[in-house]
Amino acid sequence: MVNKVILLGRIGSDPEVRTTADGTTVSSFSLATSETWKGKDGSKQEKTEWHRIVAWRRLGEIVGQYLKKGNLVYVEGKIQSREYDGKAGSKQKAYEIVINDMKMMPSGKNEGGSSSKPATQKQDEDFPTEDDLPM
C-alpha cells in the first residue's frame, strides 16, 4: 500500500513552531495549490486548495527558521488524519500532510543572485549548508 503526497505551492502564512512536552519540535503551515483551466465559455477558471502541512524534529526546525509566507515550496509526505473534539463536544476529523522532504524553490525574482538550484532538506539529514539556502 502507498500513502504519498507531492505538492508544489505557496505558503499561506508564516510557519507556527511549537515544542512538545518531550522537547520535540513541530512546525505547521498552510500551503496553497492552484489549478487553472478554460471554462466552456472560454473564460479562465481557477481553483485553489489549501493544505495543512506538518514537519517534525529537525525538518520542523528548518521550516520554522527559513520558510515565510509567500515562499514557493515543494513538499513530499503522507496524508494523516486525527480526531479532535469540536464545538459542543462533537468529534471532528482533520487531515494533514506530514512531510519528510522539502525543497525551497527559487522565487524567480533573482533576489540577491540566488542560484536556480532549489535547496533540499530531508527529515533525517543534517542542517543545509549556506549554498543550499535561498537568498
Image: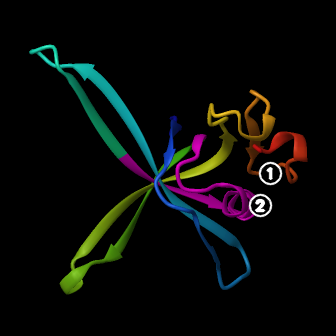
The circle on residue 124 is 1
Q: Which residue is drawn at 62% across and 31% down?
A: 108
Residue 2 place in picture, x, y as percent: 52, 35
Horizontal arrangement in the rendering, residue 125 relative to residue 72 (left or right)? right
Three-letter code for the amino acid on which mark 1 is drawn: Asp
The answer to the question of whether label 2 and label 1 lie on touching residues, with beta carbons closer than 8 A, is yes
Residue 70 place in picture, x, y as percent: 53, 49
Q: Which residue is drawn at 32% across and 40% down?
A: 48
Horizontal arrangement in the rendering, residue 110 relative to residue 86 (left or right)? right
Q: Which of 2 and 119 is in front in this view?
A: 119
Dot 2 or dot 1: first in sequence order is: 2
Q: Which residue is drawn at 79% across and 30% down?
A: 115
Q: In this view, does 124 lie above or below 115?
A: below
Residue 76 place in picture, x, y as percent: 59, 40
The label nearer to you, 2 versus 1, is: 2
Q: Is residue 27 above or below residue 69?
A: below
Dot 2 crowding, Cα within 10 Å, few <14, some 14–19, many 20+: many
Q: Nearer the viewer, residue 2 or 79?
A: 79
Give, as a single range, the part of the protein colored magenta: 50-75
Dot 1 crowding, Cα within 10 Å, few <14, some 14–19, many 20+: few
